[in-house]
């Protein structure tokens, strides 16, 4: 199995061997410069770690850091599996409605331009109606591969993404959260990937046990889709390998 979205840099080195033992690979995204630098180091030690470079939107914008990350993409694009994690500050804006969303849209567009330049997929933090803004930007720059991670939204937002060829992923919260279970119900299995978003805590799971978390998601997809567990595993693996062009 593949963990299609994890913050691997936030784990201690001492647990990485055990964590990665039972998975085929992980897509490790960055939050900023510090995490990207650590991911570069981790990638040197593990062939199954595939890294992305981006600026997480749920933080105050630092244009010096954003520009440094954009330069790192130019320098390391051949080593990257994707651009990300990037997107819009859904939860930050809930806490502070004075935040200028346009500034985050402008930053996101800079990373989308890099994805277009280097033909890299983009990993998106864009939920609810934010996804509609992002879809317009992706169309503007003719982005072919976009991954909406831990996706959730109204049926109308689902429909907007279903009208594209973009992918979505779900976390272990499908074991209890109706919003993300609805994603499994509405999206065909061929459009789904699975992720932990580790080390984010999920009810009933240990954050270092990523394989256990992924199997938990598989079980829910099996129940909802009525597809055998082995077929679910095969399909989500193929989805991830094909989307990220993994061997």
Image (spheres, helix red, strand yellow):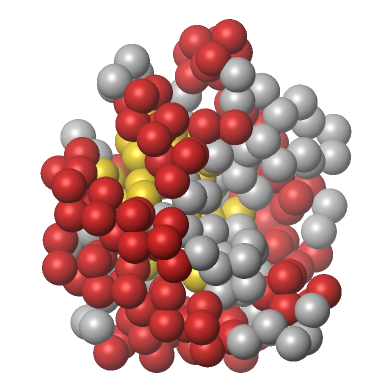
7 relative to 167 in the view: left or right: right
Find the residue positioned furthest to the front. Answer: 64
* For residue 245, above or below residue 153: above
* For residue 229, above or below residue 245: above
Rendered residue at 72%/71% (across/down): 92
Tell me residue 90's x, y (percent).
68, 74
Rendered residue at 25%/44% (across/down): 80
Label count reads 0
Tell me residue 163's x, y (percent).
41, 85
Q: Quadrant of residue 67?
A: bottom left
* For residue 58, above or below residue 19: below
Rendered residue at 52%/78% (across/down): 104
Residue 98: in sight, yes or no? yes
* For residue 240, above or below residue 177: above
Residue 184: in sight, yes or no? no
Rendered residue at 15%/61% (across/down): 118
53 relative to 154 in the view: left or right: left
Tell me residue 233's x, y (percent).
48, 38
For the C terminus, the quadrant is: top left
112 relative to 29 in the view: left or right: left
- Nearer-the-camera pick, 153 or 51: 51
Tell me residue 76's x, y (percent).
20, 44
């Amino acid at each position: 199995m593949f963990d299609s979205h994890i913050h691997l840099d936030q784990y201690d080195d001492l647990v990485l061997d055990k964590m990665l033992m039972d998975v085929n690979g992980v897509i490790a995204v960055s939050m900023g410069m510090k995490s990207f630098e650590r991911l570069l180091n981790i990638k040197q030690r593990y062939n199954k770690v595939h890294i992305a470079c981006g600026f997480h939107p749920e933080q105050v914008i630092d244009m010096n850091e954003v520009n440094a990350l954009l330069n790192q993409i130019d320098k390391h694009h051949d080593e990257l599996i994707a651009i990300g994690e990037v997107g819009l500050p859904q939860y930050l804006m809930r806490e502070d409605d004075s935040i200028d969303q346009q500034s985050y849209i402008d930053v996101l567009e800079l990373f989308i331009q890099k994805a277009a330049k280097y033909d890299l997929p983009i990993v998106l933090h864009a939920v609810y109606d934010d996804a509609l803004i992002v879809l317009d930007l992706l169309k503007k720059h003719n982005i072919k591969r976009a991954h909406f991670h831990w996706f959730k939204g109204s049926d109308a937002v689902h429909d907007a993404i279903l009208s594209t060829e973009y992918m979505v992923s779900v976390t272990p919260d499908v074991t209890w959260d109706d919003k993300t279970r609805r994603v499994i119900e509405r999206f065909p299995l061929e459009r789904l990937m699975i992720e932990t978003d580790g080390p984010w805590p999920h009810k009933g799971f240990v954050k270092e046990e990523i394989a256990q978390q992924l199997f938990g998601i598989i079980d829910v997809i099996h129940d909802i889709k009525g597809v055998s567990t082995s077929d679910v595993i095969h399909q989500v693996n193929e989805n991830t390998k094909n989307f990220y062009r993994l061997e």
